[in-house]
């Protein structure tokens, strides 16, 4: 594999892991990173942002956190430093070309008609195909000089939570153009840096649209700066499970959701009759687990009318859950953050109009914490209209990636980091190890038809448990089942614990995969 040309797009947690494991296999990939910093979203997140996973669950298996970091949820700066140390330790930094943005990529050498007709992935099931097809990437550097680069294989590690902001649309005259103040997305806010962002917010009437991680972080910074004198208003369309940590009534909820026993309570893709029967029998226990945790987490939410309409289980199934910034509910109590629940909103000259209000929320700054268009980001990478049309699938299905990595109809390409888990870092590492083993000839992919059938099973799983959020591509509640599949593909033993009861009831995390050696 050392002579193969491999290009990785993106130097976030997935891109770095992919580069590290390819280097171990003798391949020296080129990593194009549009930013001047590595770390993906961690490079530009607000300073008040912290991990959403507990520290022991968010690390590469072969690179533990330094002893100096003791926080349960390390800060944005600590995470960025950790990632930088990982890149330097394993030689990843030498492969990264910062300030290089991929404008588009085109598959050449084989016609689209031939690609569409292939029954085996890439025509033969091998990572690099038969040597005829290749990718040509148009890349612009920091000075806007454009070059063409050729690759035998491309790994897209561009993530879902950056790049293409999701901005709501409005009727004419009801959007930001009607507002006299400043409007931006959290993406632009993060790029400003802490000092400039604080200068912008200080003494201002700020309205934040949204109620998940980025919106909560911005509101926390605003409340810290302005207190109750200029409270930050959050316009909330959908209530979410915003929790202080992973303990309910003193009990770690990871023991309810992140071990093998918890996965027996869920119908799994390709599970077979006996596992299906067991999941059906144990469904009431799954309901009890969820109600136990909800009874604790809902206490501060109920006070403010913010208990979600969906269960905690459904939130975990779609990775739609967030850890509260420090003192979030205290700030709601004191009034430095004010919640306005509204399914719709619009702009006027003075600020934001919400349902049922006779007057607007007077604002100087409005910040959209409304997420990103991850699907569009993937589609925009391709020059071909055919690949654009199939890359993320129709809106009525899950994103069609076999093992959450390989599109059955797009050859010599993998997507890492699009699908989430509740422990993203080590999930990214396992995928990178799986991909490197595949590229090194460790195994062949199934037929296109078999991969599509497997994707359909995961589609059924997501639609069964996600209450309409099946596009989320989250393996949160089945991360062990998913990891088992990757292990089996690599010829590794998926059972990583010592003893029957440990295998059944102990939480699975990065430390269980330290000595994973693909055969």
Image: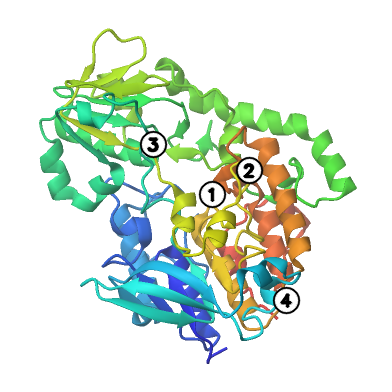
Res. 63 in view: no
Q: Residues within 10 Å of mark 3 (few under 14, many from 20)?
A: many
Precedes in sequence: disc 2 or disc 1: 2
**Image quadrant of residue 231?**
top left
User: In what quadrant of the picture does the N terminus appear?
Assistant: bottom right
Q: Residues within 10 Å of mark 2 (few under 14, many from 20)?
A: many
**Disc 2 to disc 3, how far (Cα)?**
20 Å
Proximity of marks 1 and 4: CB atoms separated by less than 8 Å: no
**Disc 1 to disc 4, how far (Cα)?**
29 Å
Q: Which residue is mark 4?
A: 444
Q: Which mark is residue 257?
A: 2
**Disc 2 to disc 1, how far (Cα)?**
10 Å
Proximity of marks 2 and 1: CB atoms separated by less than 8 Å: yes
- When the figure is inspected, residue 329 is found, relative to residue 127, above or below; the finding is above
> Which residue is at 36% across, 63% downward?
39
Residue at disc 4, secondary structure: loop
Precedes in sequence: disc 1 or disc 4: 1
Relative placement, left or right, of 64 versus 415 is left
Q: Which mark is residue 324?
A: 3
**Image quadrant of residue 436?**
bottom right
Q: Which residue is mark 1?
A: 422
Q: Mark 3, mark 4: which one is toward the viewer? A: 4
Res. 286 in view: yes
Q: Mark 2, mark 1: which one is toward the viewer? A: 1
**Disc 4 to disc 2, how far (Cα)?**
32 Å
Relative placement, left or right, of 461 versus 236 is right
Residue at disc 3, secondary structure: loop
């Amino acid at each position: 594999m050392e002579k193969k040309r491999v290009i990785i797009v993106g130097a976030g947690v997935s891109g770095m892991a992919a580069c590290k494991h390819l280097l171990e296999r003798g391949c020296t990939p080129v990593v194009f990173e549009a930013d001047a910093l590595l770390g993906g979203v961690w490079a530009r997140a607000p300073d008040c942002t912290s991990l959403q996973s507990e520290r022991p669950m968010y690390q590469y298996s072969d690179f533990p956190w330094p002893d100096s970091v003791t926080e349960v949820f390390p800060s944005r700066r600590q995470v960025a430093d950790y990632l930088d140390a990982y890149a330097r330790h394993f030689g990843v930094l030498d492969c990264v070309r910062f300030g290089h943005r991929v404008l588009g990529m085109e598959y050449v050498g084989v016609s689209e008609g031939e690609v569409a007709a292939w029954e085996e992935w890439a025509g033969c099931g091998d990572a690099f195909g038969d040597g005829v097809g290749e990718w040509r990437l148009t890349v612009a550097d920091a000075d806007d000089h454009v070059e063409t680069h050729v690759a035998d294989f491309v790994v897209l590690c561009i993530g879902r939570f950056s790049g293409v902001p999701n901005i709501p649309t409005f009727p004419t005259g009801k959007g930001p153009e009607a507002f006299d103040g400043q409007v931006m997305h959290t993406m632009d806010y993060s790029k400003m840096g802490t000092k400039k962002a604080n200068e912008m917010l200080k003494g201002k009437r700020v309205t934040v649209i949204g109620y998940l991680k980025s919106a909560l972080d911005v509101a926390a910074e605003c409340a810290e700066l302005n207190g109750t004198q200029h409270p930050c208003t959050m316009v909330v369309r959908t209530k979410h499970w915003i929790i202080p940590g992973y303990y309910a009534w003193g009990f770690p909820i990871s023991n309810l959701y992140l071990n093998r026993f918890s996965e027996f309570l869920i119908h799994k893709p390709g599970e077979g009759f006996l596992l299906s029967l067991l999941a059906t029998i144990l469904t009431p226990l799954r309901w009890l687990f969820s109600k136990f945790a909800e009874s604790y987490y809902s206490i501060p939410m109920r006070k403010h009318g913010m208990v979600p309409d969906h269960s905690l289980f459904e939130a975990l199934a779609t990775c739609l859950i967030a850890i509260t910034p420090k003192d979030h509910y205290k700030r709601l109590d004191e009034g430095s953050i004010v919640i306005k629940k509204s399914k719709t909103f619009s702009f006027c000259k003075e600020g934001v109009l919400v349902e049922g209000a006779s007057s607007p929320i007077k604002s100087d700054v409005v910040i959209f914490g409304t997420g990103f268009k991850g699907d569009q980001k993937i589609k925009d990478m391709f020059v071909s209209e055919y690949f654009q049309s199939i890359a993320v699938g129709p809106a009525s299905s899950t994103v069609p990636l076999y093992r959450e990595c390989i599109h059955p109809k797009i050859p010599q390409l993998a997507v890492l980091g699009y699908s989430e888990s509740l422990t993203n870092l080590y999930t990214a590492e396992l995928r990178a190890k799986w991909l490197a083993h595949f590229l090194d000839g460790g195994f062949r992919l199934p037929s296109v038809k078999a991969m599509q059938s497997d994707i359909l099973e995961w589609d059924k799983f997501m639609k069964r448990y996600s209450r309409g959020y099946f596009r989320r591509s989250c393996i949160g509640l089945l991360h062990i089942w998913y990891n088992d599949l990757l292990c089996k593909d690599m010829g590794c033993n998926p059972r990583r614990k010592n003893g029957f009861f440990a295998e059944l009831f102990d939480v699975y995390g990065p430390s269980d995969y330290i000595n994973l050696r693909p055969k």
